[in-house]
Amino acid sequence: MTMQSETITDAKRATLVSAERAMLRAIEHLRAEQTERGAWWGDYGGPMFLMPMYVAACRYARREIPADKRGRMLEYIGNVQQPDGSVGLHAEGAGSMFTTAMTYAMIRTLGMSADHPVASKMRAWIRDRGGPVGAASWGKFTLALLGLYPWEGLAPLLPELWLLPYATPFHPGRLWCHCRQVYLPMAYLYAKRSTCAPDVLTAQLREELYPTPYDSIAWSEHIETVAREDAYRPSSPVLRAANKAMLAYEKRASRRVRERAVRSVYEHVCYEDDVTNDIKIGPVNAVLNTLCHVVEGDLARAERGFVELERWYLWDGHDGLKMQGYNSTEIWDTTFAAQSILATPFADEAKDVLAKAHDFVRDNQIIEDVPSFEKYYRHRSKGGWPFSNRPHGWPITDCTAEGFKVAVALEESQAEKVPVELLRDSVRLMLSWQNDDGGWASYERQRGGAWIEALNPSQVFGDIMVDYSYVECSSAVMQALAKAKRRFAGEFDVEIDRALARGAALLRAKQREDGSFEGSWAVCFTYGTWFGVSGLLAAGASTRDPAIVRACEFLLSKQRKDGAWGEHHTSCSERRWVDHPDGHAANTAWALMTLARAKSSAQGEMRRAAQWLIDRQSTDGSWPRESLVGVFNRTCMINYENYRRYFPLWALGEWAATER
Ligand code: LAN
């Protein structure tokens, strides 16, 4: 008996000692990776529909892409092409007609010959499956811009919707900001039937892409057609009916009203450019807004759009040149890197690193609201933090929460702090974002009913129509509010207590039968459960609370024999746990942190998880690149390059603290 417990203690001690060494190495690695600006950022590729849109815009605008860049773009496609010749919705996904058809047009535009093995295999895949008539709607849209699909084969994208009174339940201003900002320039380009001037390549591509002669296709019958591979959310009966009604309207649309609608839409496009310093909220409107200016003939604006797009969204990475999912990941990565260092016993040794991180966070807080924000369907911004940086300027609920947490955690040690009034603004902003259901969405309050999802026209993405309450966003804000209550003792107590109680009720309602929480922005249940448990604890739940105990039991039931956790990305689309063939450092880190925060009694399991992380660390102090672990809208994976640099560190830090 004594012997055995001594051996366990020895094993624990040995793991603790090697954990400390691992932490120091990881911190040194983070130090080396920190940029001049004090931030971390990294590859944010993965979605495969972005670069084809950019290249289409360049072709439209006759913008030359330098030969070296073209070469690296083609290299990227060679690296992510699936063995069957297709391209997935994301770099690791099975073939999608949407992205494969667009990518084919792209590689040919970039100068690859039709006989190249990459091209011929891709073309065969497309033609064997009936060609681009089965591409999801954004694919058809992009091909329409290129003159490779006629506009009559698309569902109408009416600019007039923007003229409706806001009280209309499906007014565009009520949509999730990303959805709204994609369909805004689309409505402009659709109304103008913007089509690139045809040339020899147009004729070649029409022949290469389609298995039947282009001129013989009955386009208007293919408005709702979607290939089996793309059909995650095929058009619902409600959407089909709406499309029919819009087509009928389109035939009789008044020219005057159309013109007024187009002017209004274009004004919103310009506003978005202005308030984001031409960066735009995301990669899709970065391309499409720029194209609107080309069509409008405002070439100075178009040029600014292209310059900012190329500066911020193009990324020459480990596997080639790609387009990123956002203009940068700086605030997100920096707040997590800082918190991971703070969770270790070595924060003092990394004082300089933390000071630089603090200053980056301070200098990238948003310090004013956008002008006339209500007119442009914007929420307040002042006091918020974005995902990337201040010039981008769209505040996000959980980024604000993480920014606030870091600002407060480092406040005492810094001379030039975040001004206290701006910290208060941040608290007020977080409170103002709470939804009626008690949770927090991503950028704004939820402005429309979930039923609008029946009108989701994308076919490939889930949950894009309104900004829903998310476990992650709710938890992050709740953690920050709990900190705010301590920081501003007495000032916001009543509001914060009330917000936390309502938030906790929402989290409890979201917990699944099996004790897990579903994540929406990373794979999947380990991520969601980390947030679910942390949010409940922040709201005052005890570690013996049945909800917390059940969540830990769920995690323990999924631990692998080798001590790790590994979830496959299809967990997100299928909304159930799917094992990954391998353990994953980020999944393992989230699970281990959850157990540590919940003061789980499963000490042996936690030690084995820690040991797995330690054994897995690379000599440079990082962890190896594994399968993509970020996700959006249930189906599309995205690469968070730095998750393998700070989450394992953070988990080792929190685990080691439970052992001391
Ligand atoms: C992001 C990036 C950041 C991310 C977190 C802050 C990590 C998350 O906790 C909340 C959601 C958010 C803000 C998020 C939402 C969806 C985004 C904007 C992205 C994954 C980056 C790219 C993606 C965007 C929707 C891509 C364009 C595609 C569309 C379907 C419009």
Image (spheres, rainbow, N blue to C red):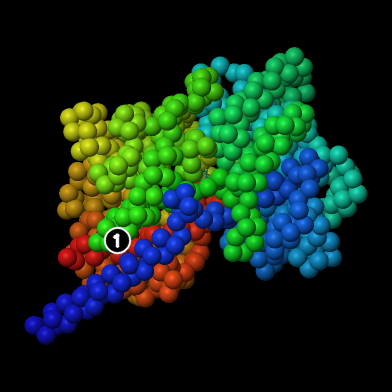
Spot occupied by residue 63 in the image (x, y as percentages of width and height): 78, 44
Taking the spot 61% from the left edge, 35% from the top edge, the residue there is 278
- Return the residue nearer the eye: 356 or 124: 356
Say if 629 sits above or below 490 in the image: below
The residue that mark 1 highlights is 349
Say if 596 sits above or below 206 in the image: below
> Is residue 234 at all visible to an observer of this figure?
no
Spot occupied by residue 350 in the image (x, y as percentages of width and height): 32, 58
- Return the residue nearer the eye: 238 or 356: 356
Taking the spot 64% from the left edge, 43% from the top edge, the residue there is 309
> Is residue 649 at all visible to an observer of this figure?
yes
Spot occupied by residue 66 in the image (x, y as percentages of width and height): 76, 53
The single residue placed furthest to the top in the displayed view is 256
Taking the spot 13% from the left edge, 79% from the top edge, the residue there is 5
- Number of marks present in the image shown: 1
- Return the residue nearer the eye: 586 or 557: 586
Residue type at mark 1? Glu
The single residue placed furthest to the front in the displayed view is 415
The single residue placed furthest to the left in the displayed view is 2
Which image quarter: residue 427? top left
Spot occupied by residue 123 in the image (x, y as percentages of width and height): 78, 60
Quarter of the image where the C terminus is located:
bottom left
Lateral position of residue 88 relative to residue 353, left or right: right
Lateral position of residue 147 relative to residue 141, left or right: right
Lateral position of residue 494 relative to residue 108, left or right: left
The single residue placed furthest to the right in the displayed view is 200
Quarter of the image where the N terminus is located:
bottom left
- Return the residue nearer the eye: 219 or 54: 54
Decide: few, some or many residues near mark 1? Use Cα within 10 Å; few <14, some 14-19, many ≥20.
few
Taking the spot 47% from the left edge, 49% from the top edge, the residue there is 37
Lateral position of residue 592 relative to residue 633, left or right: left
